[in-house]
Image (cartoon, grey):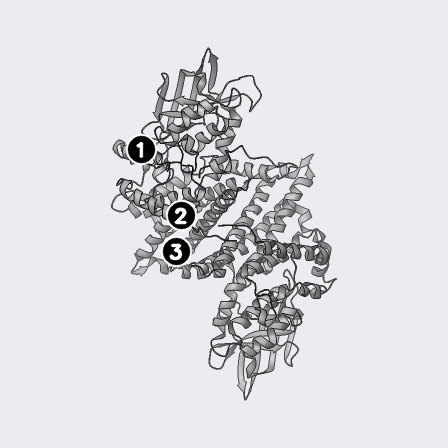
Amino acid sequence: MDFDLEWTPEQIEFQAEVRGWLANHVPKLKDHADPAALTADEYALQRKLGRELGAKGWLYPAMPSEYGGGGLDLGMSMIIEEELDLYHLATPPYYDTGGRLGSASIMVWGTDEQKQYFLPKILRGEIRTWQLLSEPESGSDLASVATSAVRDGDDYLINGTKIYVGSNHGAEYSWMIVKTDPNGDRHKNLSWFMMPMGLPGITVEPMDLLLVGGERGAASGVKNTVYFDNVRIPASHLIGGENNGWEVAGTHLEIEHGLLRSAVRSDEMLDRVMNYARTTTRRGLPLTDDPDVQDSLVDFYINSQVTRLLHFRNFAYRAQGKQLTYEGSQAYLHQKRSALSKARSILEVMGPRALVSDPEWAAENGHIEVHQRASIVEQHPGGTAEIQRVIIARRLGIGREKREQPGQLPSAENQGN
Amino acid sequence: MDLTLTEQQKMLQATMNELRNRDYTKETLVAIDAGKEPALGHWQSLASTGILGSLIPEEFGGAGASLADTAVIYEELGRGPVPGPHFSSGVLAALVLLEGGTDTQKRTLLPGIASGERIFALAITEEDYGWGPEFIQTLARTRGTDVLIDGTKLFVHDATDATDLIVATRLETGSIGLVHMDKHARGVATRALPGFATGLSEVTLLQALVSKSSIISSMEDGWDVLERAMRKATLILSAYQVGGLSQVFDMSLLYSQTRRQFQQPIGRFQRVQDHVIDVVNYLDAARWTTYEALWKADEAREGAIEAMHTAATTASESYYYGCNSAHDVHAGMGIVREYGLTLHTKMSRTLYHYLGSPRYHRKRLAHALGL
């Protein structure tokens, strides 16, 4: 057994190349505690970086090069991820769910023509895509979506409402799951579309939420409600065939339920809270002298290690071509739950300072206050903690003779990370 | 990055699995626990596999294996859980002798440990219980070329099965002396402590006399020797706890599939599922913190101490809470002794404080992190 991320000479050379390239191409980006503060100009810079990465195949390095990915192995992908992490960025350096999630579904279920049409745009960073899944009446029970698509000649007419969608600064495409057979059996009545967001009849309206989180440079900032009023979309944008949408969604849901979390990212909040405790005094004594503070920090540290190791295990297994079953959801569940417990540790250590965003008194430039909110917000995306438990139970075969099989993924070398 | 067992480790695992299925069936383990079979009934068979010398270099009759290899053995033993002095003798005592013993002590004692002929127990803790030198009150006074020892050692693991003891004493200089003694020497008495714990005993030392040459740590403070030995031994103990918990998980999963209530397997109820999921979450947290810590210790990596304290905390807490969750799954059946779950519950409690409780390791972790 070996936990080393040891790079071959070839990979070390690649690392130097990536490092050098990033030093010349990563723009100076303001460190916003709240991603909602991202301006249009800053977003444009992020997109530019995305296109530049995309041109080199580094935006989605593990995706096949014939479709605009890098065709690189997981080790090389991880090097890119590690190097971007030093800038508190990730691939992609802005919110885009298309490259890992949507494109995986297209890869598995799309026709050759669809793959040629959609994938290069996404994987080279030319377009940004949102995912349209939840609806006002369909959350955890995603298969109950009511947004409808009715065939009309060579087109479909879409009507309905999607919520918790996207980010600030718009998107060129969205991928969505809709109902195509109102009388069909559950799971056999849905279809999956790639939706051009400029079509007439689409209205996007920002939601007022506690916070919209995300990861590193990929934070979304804003979530929207998207209304579809008789939106006419060509049937060529239907992926995977009519009434097969649940299978198509199974691919990206499988990845979202924990698979895509990177195993290499540092725990930024751990660094921040340790830094705060080490540099703060209370009544003239270092905060770290307080045994209660030590307890809280050690709790935080252990939680952080377990989350990291579960993701690392998943990454290592996947790199070896081992099929994961319950492990993705387990890591995701641990990450969600420990976010809450970390937030409490921080509140214990910092007191009310953890809760204020006032420029004079906020700790760590406001990142702490944002994390207090983010820890709550993190509980539901990609399936609630309860849904992760349902998946774990089915995959382990708790109370079942047969274990549930995972959703179909692109072949191991094409999974991205 | 390769999180799989080596071929050699797979063979070790298979050997131990075979031994467990032959000598330590659930029926046997339940009988040992009830005092109906002797704990050492299969000791020769266990020793013949060579596992007691796993960490002992070949020159002293052992296999000279790594901590990770040894952990594979102990994870399998933990699945029983197979009780007995294998850990006290083959791991803890062997490491103490390796870390602090003279060449003569190593040459005379280690081969006996490796062969199973000698069985060592470590008498460290006392009534004023804790895993630090400040808790050692047992006195060792010099009488010419001898040392005279007085005190009571409490909650000693495996002393009743032992042939030899290593006793932590307070020397006249104020430092800690680790003293080797024949358990059957005059003035030494051991008594098993009954209750909800496996293998604990009291060791009374009343003017027990040994030669000065029996002090293992004559060149340095004995606690430093013990500390170094414990850092390694703790990891093997964590692996044993991981093994225990993986068995608890297997039992819980199977029970969720086979036990029927309300006309269906109880595992169809999400309330029950949650308890089984808790067990697997505890298990994997313990497993991966332990494996990483083993790797870091074997490879002398940066952060090995932090990883060890993280693993020790996580494994002890996980085994403890994991058993609680398993009882939630099993309800009444869980407390039927012959079912076997209580062997683990009892072991999870017994090991909770051994070589330092989670609270102790958290404090040490804070220290190691520079807090």
Q: Secondary structure at mark 2?
A: helix
Query: Disc 1, disc 3: CB below 8 Å?
Result: no
Between B133 and B286, the one lying in front of the other is B286
Which residue position holds label 2? A10
- Kindly report the distance in space between the C-alpha atoms of the residues bearing marks 1 and 2: 29 Å
Q: Which residue is mark 3?
A: A293
Mark 1, residue position: A47
**Viewed as shown, does residue B244 lie left or right of A39?**
right
Q: CA distance from mark 1 to mark 3?
A: 41 Å
Cβ–Cβ below 8 Å for labels 3 and 2? no
Q: Is residue A13 left or right of residue A193?
A: left
Check disc 2: other Cα within 10 Å, few if <14, some if 14-19, many if 20+: few
Residue A132, image x, y percentages: 43, 26
In the rendered image of this protein, does residue B1 appear above or below residue A198?
below
Mark 1: amino acid: Arg
Identity of the residue furthest to the bottom in this view? B144
